[in-house]
Image (spheres, rainbow, N blue to C red):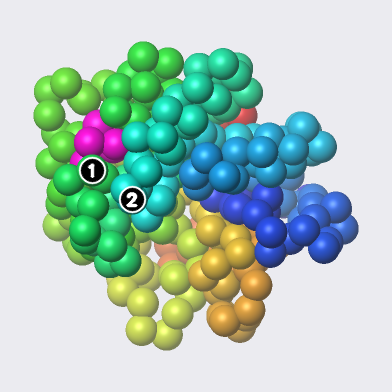
Amino acid sequence: MITFTDTHSHIFIEDFDDDRAEMIKNIVDAGIIKMILPNIDKDSIHQLKSTLCDYPEYCFGAMGLHPTSVKEDYKEQLQAIEEELFLNKDKYIAIGEIGLDLYWEKTYFEQQVEVLRKQFDWALELKLPIIIHSRKSEDHIINIIRDKKYSDLRGVFHCWPGSKEQTKRVLDLGFYLGIGGVVTYKNSSLPELLQDVNIESILLETDSPYLSPVPFRGKRNDSRNILLIAEKVSETKGVSMEHLSEVTNANVKKLFGI
């Protein structure tokens, strides 16, 4: 069986409370043998940990504070994330989901930058990769990473939305591109963008339960849809599904150690 890893799923959130066990069985049966689950904020920690505990063979956790959760209580949020990460650092394979978001919320942008830099520091201290959310903020994040202080950072730009020039800058930094359901959308620029990207720099992801690929756009997404994303990437890059599976799983092992 061809197998894949979903490098970005939120199957631990309430959208799956009614059928999580059944869904994970179906996902594994479909050949998606690993899922990386990035945290959101302090309120999601408990459910994330519970899911990791219930499915240790298939689910791997990342701990971080999502930029859209950076609001007036951001210091309290950050402290809770830090305590969990450093008390249970052996449980987490990455720092994430972290980044900047200028699409939903601009009020706390300075605080988002502060929080991001703090989490970059954690990644360096713990020698962990980072999972980056970069909506409408690609250049800001790239410029921060280019700071000499952060030259040893490694990771993935999740749900990559950038331009050709931004893509080159990210690849020059040695980061991976997270490719999800958007690659299947009719007006997506990703297929053209991927023409110049080696599959050795690609990770596959769903962002489940969000961003379902065609033909399920608008419905709840789950990790089985990695197969649809992989088919589109395979077609775009002119490689077999077997080869794409082999390379992207190797990419996962190289970055996350799983």
What crowding class fits label 2: few (fewer than 14 Cα within 10 Å), some (14-19), or many (20 or more)? some
Q: In the rendered image, is residue 194 in sight? A: yes
Q: Nearer the viewer, residue 27 or 18?
A: 18
Secondary structure that dominates the magenta span: helix
Q: Residue at x 54, y 50 (%)?
A: 8
From the top left corner, tell me how far across and down residue 107 is, in percent: 21, 58
From the top left corner, tell me how far across and down residue 51 is, in percent: 74, 41
Q: Residue at x 42, y 85 (%)?
A: 186
Residue 32 sits inside the magenta stretch: no
From the top left corner, tell me how far across and down residue 39 is, in percent: 53, 42
Residue 240, disc? none
Residue denoted by label 1: 111
Q: Nearer the viewer, residue 82 or 135?
A: 82
From the top left corner, tell me how far across and down residue 105 is, in percent: 28, 62
Q: Nearer the viewer, residue 150 or 88?
A: 88
Q: In the rendered image, is residue 195 in sight? A: no
Q: Secondary structure at mark 2?
A: loop
> Is residue 82 placed above or below 177 in the rendered structure?
above
Which amino acid type is shown beneath numbered disc 2?
A: Lys
Q: Please provide the residue range marked out in magenta.
A: 113-117
Left or right placement of residue 166 versus residue 14 in this view: left
Which amino acid type is shown beneath numbered disc 1?
A: Gln
What crowding class fits label 1: few (fewer than 14 Cα within 10 Å), some (14-19), or many (20 or more)? some
Q: Residue at x 41, y 17 (%)?
A: 127
The numbered mark, 1 or 2, whose residue comes first in the sequence reads 2
> Is residue 29 placed above or below 56 in the rendered structure?
below
Badges 1 and 2: C-beta atoms under 8 Å apart?
Answer: yes
